[in-house]
Every structure is written in structure tokens, then in C-alpha cells.
Amino acid sequence: MEQGADAETDGDAGHEVAEPGTPAPDPDAAPHDEAERPDGHAELASLLSNEDLLLSQQPHAPDRDEVFVTDDGRAPDAVFPQSVASGGPTREGVILWTRIDPESFDPDEPLGIEIAHSGDFGEVVYRGVVDDTGRIRAHDHVVKVDIDGALEPNREYRYRFVYDGVASRVGTCHTLPEPDASPDSLRFGVLACQNYLNGYYPALGNVAEEDLDFLIHVGDFIYESGAGEFKGLDSRDYPDRNIDLPSGEDRVQDLADYRYIYRTYRSDRFLQRALEEHTLIAAWDDHEIANDIYWDPETDAPKADHPRGEDPEFMTKLTADAIHAWWEFMPARLGYDPEAESLQDRFQLWRSFEFGDLLKLVMTDERLYRDPPRDVLPTATNCRPENEPPGRTMLGEDQLAWFLAQIRDSEARWTVWSDEVLTIPFRLGIGRASIFPVQGGWDGYTRERQYIKDKLREFSPRNFVTLTGDMHCYIAGYKKTEYGGPVTERLFDPGERVGVEFMTPAVSSLNVAEALGMTEGLVGRITEPLLRRFVTAQNPHLEFFDSHHWGYSVVEFTRDDCTYVAYGVDKHENSMDAEREVIAAYRVPDEEVELIDVTDDYAV
């Protein structure tokens, strides 16, 4: 089951909350004792939005059958312009999401919810009504309903909303298995980095047609820019992909800007279809807030690549607004403590899900707690754990203790870490001239990374797999206790393999080849294998690398193996006719830390 869930009861809007789950302590001290860390208690009362956070409503039993009478002559898009979605699965329910068009909104009109075993709704298993219209209007006309306790474990359902005689599009949702269940398999679609201004979403149209149990988004669901930023030499203009922020600025300034961005992204029909068809398990990364965001201990506030990124008061308010909008527009179930004095303590993204005895999914937050980047780019010398300044953290002490306890206590066949940024080294160069350019990943936090790897070896989960994103690449590689250089790692193979890591590509965001002008025509065909060989030669722990394509991945777990299949889908064509191909496929046998190339078995 999901930990740290916002269990809610009827009452005053904005106050149906549960205390975030208490992190289970690790028996050993985390590697931050050498440096004093700030309390992190900033005064937020005057900085946070005056509106209460949107908490999921619990519908009441219908007392008027006419709420569910529909008029088939009216189109659902006119009333539900962002369609529907589901997320936050538990054994007996999910959170269902929609948004009512403001022009169609009537404060006297209740909203109905129907759930059935089939899309014709011939056998309805649940009906509920929401009539707290003031609460709906206060949150950009977004509706989130929590039906935990109403459904059966490990079942697929169809659902829809009904408003003023109009039925929404039909969505599909899925509940979790019982803790003692033994599923034969689980299939996850994995997504990341979908810059609306930098391409189309046919990849998401293909995701909608995949046979999946759940959809995992590891972050960068939106980008905080309304201008043509985050583009490269080969980037194209997409005249029909414009975003004019309400503030009139190029970067987000407030809650209204974030809401506008989410409404725009969620208007894409391919994105809608993916969320209609699959129950979402979502994280956030930096662009849901601001580029390269981190927590500055000197000001006890967030900092980021933003025109006002050095203003502590502005960035605290902006971060709160970003999370506010994320919670409104994502069907997520998180820990939330409105009484906490620190922004870091108010929202708990980190949580875990159990899928019977087959799989445990552990999600972490690698933005709200991370220390500032180092002043120098990590090199082969200064990025070694013993040479990194002590006390630095990516996860924060409480989350780190919780995370390690989740791994230590896992009895699942597959323990899976849904992480936001690359955890294994990414080197460019040879010897002391090497650099580690992805400082925003774990290469910038090597002391804590080494501590986690040592604990992985100690706890020795049966199978450990990391699913990650952020870099806009395809990667399949090994997580090891020690790494060597391009030569020594091949000759002496230092370190013990403790897991594998799979990176899902960007749906549309800027990748390396696009940034450097290497994607088109003959140049693209030549540089694709060259870049792949160049990167894997310098990183022997990487079995595969590609940064010439965009798309998604499907990761399937069975009782015998785990299989990662990475698809490339042309983002330049806004059509299901866009070219789709298998970029790579790897299989990991049960209880073997071995990446077996099975790409030929999945070629389409």
C-alpha cells in the first residue's frame, strides 16, 4: 500500500489531512553527522497561498438519480476540457481527477462519479456525488475525489464523471494487489521530461495503447517556461505550441502561471489519452518548480535558475505555488501537514507502493532537500566520496533514513527505486582529465551515494532496479559499490554489482544530439553510433546509451525476470503515424545482476 497517504474525511475544506508518515530510523547514523544542518523552519504563513490546498473530496451517496442522466448529443470536451485521470492507487481505491470548464460551471449543479466493470456502464459498482462547488471553483475548477475503500484489490475498472447531463470521456483505473498476493507480472510505462514547447506527444499516444498495469512519471511533467527556452541547435519551432503566461513574463511568477501551464499541457489529446487509459504514479523533478532547484542552507529557502532565483522570499512562495498547482493537476496521494513551519516538512512526496510479494516501488524526492551544487565541476579526483565536503545531502537525513529502511525491510522479489536523476556515474574523459558533467545527478553527491551503495550491499535485496529520467537519454547500466576508469574498470572490474539502472528518455525535451545539431539526415545517422560508443567506452558500467531519440519505456517484472524495452517515437509529427521503433531492450534474470541484450526479440 502507499505510505504517507492523505487519508481524508468529510469536514471543512482544506483540513482533511493525515500526518505524514514518520520515517523509520536506520540503525546506523547517516553520513551527515560531521556538519551541523539548519532546522529548516522558515516563517511561511505570509508566503503561502491564501487558498487551502486542494484535498481529495469524498463523494456522498447520490440522492437524485437525475444527476447521472446523460445527453449523448453534447461533446465531453466542452464540459471536461482536460478530460480525466486516475492516480494514488491503494488496494481498495484510487483518486479520480477532472476539471470542469469554467464557462459550463454552475454552482448549483452537482457532479456525479460512476465506476463500472466495463465501459458501457451496464454494471455500475459505485456512484457518488460531489456538490461542494465552492471548493471546486476555488481550485481552478479542478475536482479530485478519493474513493479509497469502495473497490476491490487488483482490479481494473472504468469510470466517468457526469455534469449537467454531459458524461466525460471514460477512463480506466487499477487498484493494488493485496499484500499477500503473488502476481505473475507487472507492466509499467515510464515517462519523463515532456517540454510542450519543444515537440509533440505521439509517444504518449502510443503509451495509451500499451497494455500496462500502471504509468510512472519520474518528473518534468511540465516546464516552467512560456518562452522558447531549453532548446538547441537542431530544435524546431512549433507555432501551435505556444504558452502566453498570465503574468506576461517568460518564466512562471505565481500560482496563476503554473495553473495555466498545466491546463495547456493537459489540453494535448495524446497526453489525455495516456492518462485516461492508465493509473498514474507521479513524482516531480525540477521543472515542475524551476530549473535546477535546490535548498540553500544559508537562506533556508529554495534557489533555482530563475530570474528571481536568488530571492529567498520569492522562491519560497514560488515553490509553494508550484507544489500547490502540481497537487491540483495531478491525481496524487501524498503526505501533507498544513501546520508544519517548514516548506520541506509540509509536503511529503516520498512514499512506497507494494504489489503483493512481487514488487515494492520506492519513490524519493530529490529536489526539496538537496544541498547546493558544488562550486567546481566534479572531476575524477574531487568527486570521490572521500574528497567531497562532508555533510552534503541529496535526500535529507529523514528521507535517507526512511529510504534505507524501505530497502532493508523489503521482502519483495523486486525492489524498485523510482528516482528522478541518474544515480550511477557518468564520466567524460580519461584519467585525471575526466569530468562528470551531470552535476545535478548523484555525481554531485557522491558521499551520500556511496553510503547508499554500501547499505545496498549490506541489505542485499533479492533484486534491485532503479528507474530514472532527467537526462533525456536512454541508459541501461550497473549500480556498483565501486567504479574504475575507462581502462581499470574493464581490466580489474572493481566493486560489486548491487543492481541495475534504466533511464527512460524524454518525451520531447532537448537531448544531447538536438542540443549539438546532430539529429538530422546523414549527420544524425553517423553521430548516433559514434556518441553511443564514445559514452559507453568511457563508462564501462553502461551497457547502453542513446541521446538521439525521444519516446518512453515499458518495464515488465515477472517472477523470472525484469525486461526494459525503450521505444523511440518521432516528436516532430503530431500524429499516431509518427515513426516508432525499439531503441533498446534488456532482460535481467531473477537473482542475477546481469543485463542481457534482447533488442532483436522486440524489434518492430
Image (tube, rainbow, N blue to C red):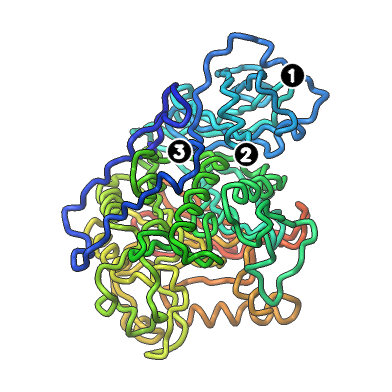
Marks 2 and 3, Cα distance to the nearest angstrom? 19 Å
Please state the total of marks drawn on the protein image.
3
Residue hosting label 1 = 70
Residue 593 seen by the camera: no
Which residue is painted at 72% across and 21% down in the image?
164
Rendering coords of residue 386 (x, y %): 24, 77
What amino acid type should be assigned to the residue bearing mark 3? Arg
Marks 3 and 1, Cα distance to the nearest angstrom? 30 Å
Marks 1 and 2, Cα distance to the nearest angstrom? 22 Å
Residue hosting label 3 = 333
- In this view of the protein, which residue sits in the foreground, 570 or 88? 88
Label of residue 277 in the image = 2
- In this view of the protein, which residue sits in the foreground, 498 or 441? 441
User: In this picture, is 218 found above or below 495?
Assistant: above
Q: Secondary structure at mark 3?
A: loop
Which residue is painted at 55% across and 49% down in the image?
189
What amino acid type should be assigned to the residue bearing mark 2? Glu
Rendering coords of residue 193 (x, y %): 58, 59
Rendering coords of residue 422 (x, y %): 44, 66
Residue 235 seen by the camera: yes
Q: Secondary structure at mark 2?
A: helix
Q: Nearer the viewer, mark 1 or mark 2?
A: 1
Q: Secondary structure at mark 1?
A: loop
Q: Earlier in the sequence, mark 3 or mark 1?
A: 1
Label 3 neighbour load within 10 Å: few <14, some 14-19, many 20+: many
Which residue is painted at 46% across and 87% down in the image?
429
